[in-house]
Image (spheres, rainbow, N blue to C red):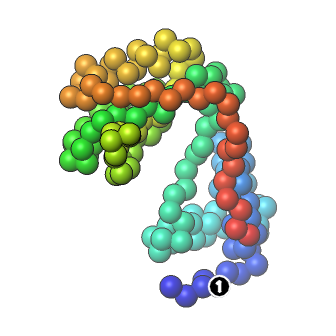
Amino acid sequence: MMKPEFSPGQLALLRIVQKDLPDSPTPFLDLARATGMEESEILDFLRELKAQGIIRRFGASIRHRESGWTHNAMVAWKATEEDAEKWAHVAIANRHVSHAYYRPGKSADWPYELYTMIHGRNPEDIQQVIMELMAEWPFREYLALNTVKELKKISMTYF
């Protein structure tokens, strides 16, 4: 892939969007004002970067601790890839689960390959979600890794 060439306005936009978007009802209009670009031009540019694979993901990131979700656990489940594909939708349909993913590489010491990140307001919330998931899917063996301390939560800076 060739290195893309960006105009000064596009570079200014990329420097802004790799951080937090404006906290406003019209964030892309605010970006247009800040960069001298048109709002539609910004949206088209970002869509094109995503279509080309230059941007993998463009979305909101909630600072869950600041919003009251102070208890979190990465729950590792013993599951096959086929099972994970089949049942992941159950996990992400739960409003307390922010993401679910499959990571191959189980061993005798670590038989887990399906992971769910569960958020709650107290430890009981986490356990409740685990029980809700177990009531809907076939997985029974899991390990809940409770968050003790958040060490770093920032996006990469490229420009």
**In the figure, 50 relative to 74: above or below?**
below
Nearer to me, 51 or 31: 51
**In the figure, 68 relative to 63: above or below?**
above
For the point 55% across and 88% down, the residue is 2
Question: What kind of residue is marked 1?
Answer: Glu
Drawn side of residue 43 relative to residue 65, left or right = left
Drawn side of residue 128 relative to residue 136, left or right = right
Q: Position of residue 118 (x, y in %)?
A: 47, 29
Drawn side of residue 12 relative to residue 1, left or right = right
Where disc 1 sits, the SS reads loop
Residue carrying label 1: 5
For the point 45% across and 27% down, the residue is 144
**In the figure, 135 relative to 104: above or below?**
above
Question: On the image, which quarter does residue 147 sit in?
Answer: top right
Q: Position of residue 84 (x, y in %)?
A: 27, 43
For the point 70% across and 39% down, the residue is 151
Residue 51 in view: yes
Where does the C terminus fall, quadrant-wise? bottom right
Question: On the image, which quarter does residue 30 sit in?
Answer: bottom right
**In the figure, 122 relative to 114: above or below?**
above
Nearer to me, 129 or 10: 129
Nearer to me, 46 or 25: 46
For label 1, the crowd category at 10 Å Cα-Cα, with few meaning under 14, some 14 to 19 and many 20 or more, is: few
Nearer to me, 116 or 108: 108
Q: Position of residue 89 (x, y in %)?
A: 30, 38
Q: Position of residue 94 (x, y in %)?
A: 38, 28
